[in-house]
Image (tube, rainbow, N blue to C red):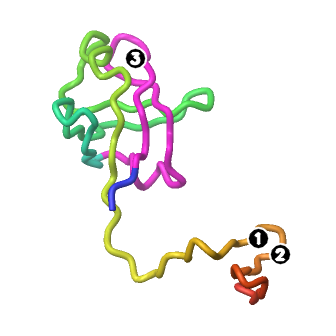
Amino acid sequence: MQLVVGRIIRPHGVRGELAVEVRTDDPELRLATGAVLATQPAAAGPLTVTRARWHTGKLLLTFDGVADRDGADGLRGVRWWWTRPNSRRSPIRMSSVITSSSGSLCTGQGTSTSER
């Protein structure tokens, strides 16, 4: 399964850094140095992260082959995909809802069981 993990917002500085919009719950794993990301559009990638750092609440990334502001500006708006490895966890059925306040799993029939 492929998941969108981020989108390039704009260049940051003159050395090819990019400010990104993070769309993942674990950017330290999925956007870490060395991560190879498929892109949309596909012609923009794949992109390999060479540096990742946080600056005033925004994640800044540097990619292999992007050395200056002009190269970075050409990637504006590009989205990245991360392929999730096969998981043994079973998905929650659409008729189920997890209530965050109680931690209970409520089925469509109105019954619930504790999932803690």
Question: Dot 2: within a 10 Å radius of its alpha carbon, few (fewer than 14), some, or many (20 or more) residues?
Answer: few
Helix, strand or loop for disc 3: strand
Q: Is residue 97 visible?
A: yes
Q: Are marks 3 and 2 in contact (CB under 8 Å)?
A: no
Name the residue located 47 percent from the left edge and 51 percent from the top edge: 28
Could you give the CA–CA distance between mark 2 and mark 1, rounded to whole angstroms?
6 Å
Say if 59 sits above or below 91 in the image.
Answer: above
Q: From the viewer's perspective, tell me whether residue 14 is left or right of residue 70.
A: right
**Residue 70 location, quadrant:** top left
Q: Is residue 87 magenta?
A: no
* Residue, disc 1: 99
User: Which of the two marks, 3 or 2, is nearer to us in this view?
Assistant: 2
* Residue, disc 3: 11
Q: Position of residue 68 (x, y in %)?
A: 27, 14
User: Which of the two marks, 3 or 1, is nearer to us in this view?
Assistant: 1
> Which residues make up the magenta segment?
4-33
Q: Amino acid at mark 2?
A: Ser
Helix, strand or loop for disc 1: loop
* Residue, disc 2: 102
